[in-house]
């Protein structure tokens, strides 16, 4: 596995399911906590590791929102966004669709225009200075209900930033039925955005069906419970609707018992287009490279198989055709060079 770990470390990648605030590294969280001493978030990295140990999904949401509260102004937002891009670049991520929750910041007093300017400024700097292309998925925080949906839709369809490509739905699934958000997704889709809601992570396959039917999902965030419904698996495979799989996250939030119980292999064997992602990496003590290594072990992959997973992410992304072709060529060239050296 050590050779494959090295292969993964240098592999050009795309990431499709990674959260803006959830990607805040301990260093950045500590820096933000120091700037806002009234916060309950620890400033010491060791204490942060303990703080990021979750008992269940509800506890994860509680901790996540406490980190959201560290973003008090546009400067905080810009700092976080650029540093997330730096961590992505370190892992050879060339392209990322970052899930951003504007409502979490606008509801805390940051004007929408200032928030959008901050993330766009960081996006341009990241591409120019780090070689990472960022695109935005604006998601509704489901726990905040329909007012959050209205505000998120207003921001996404009013004067959207150039980097915005998709509309999502995150937060807890239990007690937050997907169909209630249909009017908001209809408006977002009508404005030209793609639909990428979370579904089937901590609830059953019916939530995935709701996301497909009511929200017209083009990709599914997580979809872990899809394996409980053979008809759903067949539908996903037949229509090549990608699943954004995040193994460590699913264990950390107790969506699955442990990595050995993860249904990744069942998804792949059913013919589903699977992508590997990190979700909220520092909070789960992981990163995208680690998730690729886990997937390689669970699926018994060699270097060529790992490269195929990386191509899946490119294929499932919303990049334009030239961008996809360029990144796929880079992956293929990297694999060929690796095989020659081996």
Image (tube, rainbow, N blue to C red):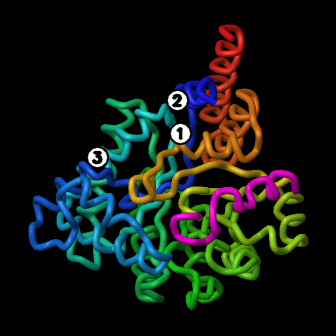
Whether the magenta-drawn stretch holds residue 268 is answered as: yes
Question: Is 141 or 172 nearer to us in this picture?
Answer: 172
Residue 40, compared with residue 300, is above or below; it is: below
- Say above or below: 184 vs 302: below
Mark toward the start of the polypeptide (2 vs 3): 2
> Which badge, 1 or 3, comes first in the chain's sequence?
3
The residue that mark 1 highlights is 289
Front position in the image: 134 or 70: 70
Relative to 55, is 185 on the left or the right? Answer: right
Mark 1 vs mark 3: give the one in front. 1
For the C terminus, the quadrant is top right
Please tell me which residue is depicted at 11% across the width and 59% down the height of the picture.
34
**What span is in magenta?**
251-270
Instruction: Identify the residue position indicated by label 2 in the image.
Output: 9
User: Where in the figure is residue 286, as x and y percent of width and height?
Assistant: 47, 49
Q: Nearer the viewer, residue 106 or 293?
A: 293
**Which tag is nearer the camera, tag 2 or tag 3?**
2
Q: CA distance from mark 1 to mark 2?
A: 6 Å
- Residues under numbered marks 1 and 2 in contact, where contact means CB atoms less than 8 Å apart: yes
Picture disc at residue 121 = 3
Q: Residues within 10 Å of mark 1 (few under 14, many from 20)?
A: many
Where 120 sits versus 68, above or below?
above
Instruction: Kindly give the residue lying farthest to the top in the view shown.
Output: 341
Tag 2's secondary structure? helix
């Amino acid at each position: 596995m050590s050779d494959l770990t090295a292969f993964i470390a240098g592999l050009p990648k795309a990431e499709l399911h990674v959260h803006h605030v959830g990607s805040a590294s301990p260093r950045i969280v500590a820096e933000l906590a120091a700037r806002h001493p009234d916060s309950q978030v620890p400033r010491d990295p060791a204490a942060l590791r303990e703080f990021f140990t979750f008992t269940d999904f509800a506890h994860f949401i509680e901790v996540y929102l406490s980190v959201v509260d560290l973003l008090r102004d546009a400067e905080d937002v810009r700092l976080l966004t650029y540093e997330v891009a730096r961590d992505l670049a370190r892992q050879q991520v060339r392209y990322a669709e970052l899930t951003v929750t504007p409502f979490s910041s606008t509801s805390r007093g940051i004007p929408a225009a200032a928030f959008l300017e901050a993330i766009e400024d960081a996006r341009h700097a990241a591409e120019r200075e780090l070689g990472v292309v960022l695109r935005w998925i604006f998601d509704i925080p489901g726990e905040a209900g329909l007012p959050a949906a209205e505000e998120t839709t207003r921001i996404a369809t009013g004067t959207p930033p150039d980097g915005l490509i998709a509309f999502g739905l995150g937060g807890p699934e239990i007690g937050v039925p997907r169909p209630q958000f249909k009017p908001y997704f209809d408006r977002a889709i009508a404005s030209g955005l793609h639909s990428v809601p979370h579904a089937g992570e901590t609830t059953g396959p019916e939530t995935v069906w709701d996301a497909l039917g009511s929200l017209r999902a083009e990709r599914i965030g997580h979809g872990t419970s899809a394996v409980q419904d053979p008809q759903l698996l067949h539908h996903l495979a037949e229509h090549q609707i990608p699943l954004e799989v995040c193994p460590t996250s699913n264990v950390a939030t107790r969506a699955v018992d442990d990595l050995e119980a993860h249904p990744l292999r069942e998804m792949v064997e059913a013919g589903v287009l699977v992508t590997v992602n990190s979700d909220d990496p520092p909070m789960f003590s992981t990163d995208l490279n680690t998730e690729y290594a886990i997937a390689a072990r669970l699926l018994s992959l060699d270097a060529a198989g790992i490269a195929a997973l990386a191509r899946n992410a490119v294929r499932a992304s919303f990049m334009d055709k030239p961008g996809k072709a360029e990144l796929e060529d880079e992956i293929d060239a990297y694999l060929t060079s690796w095989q020659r050296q081996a």
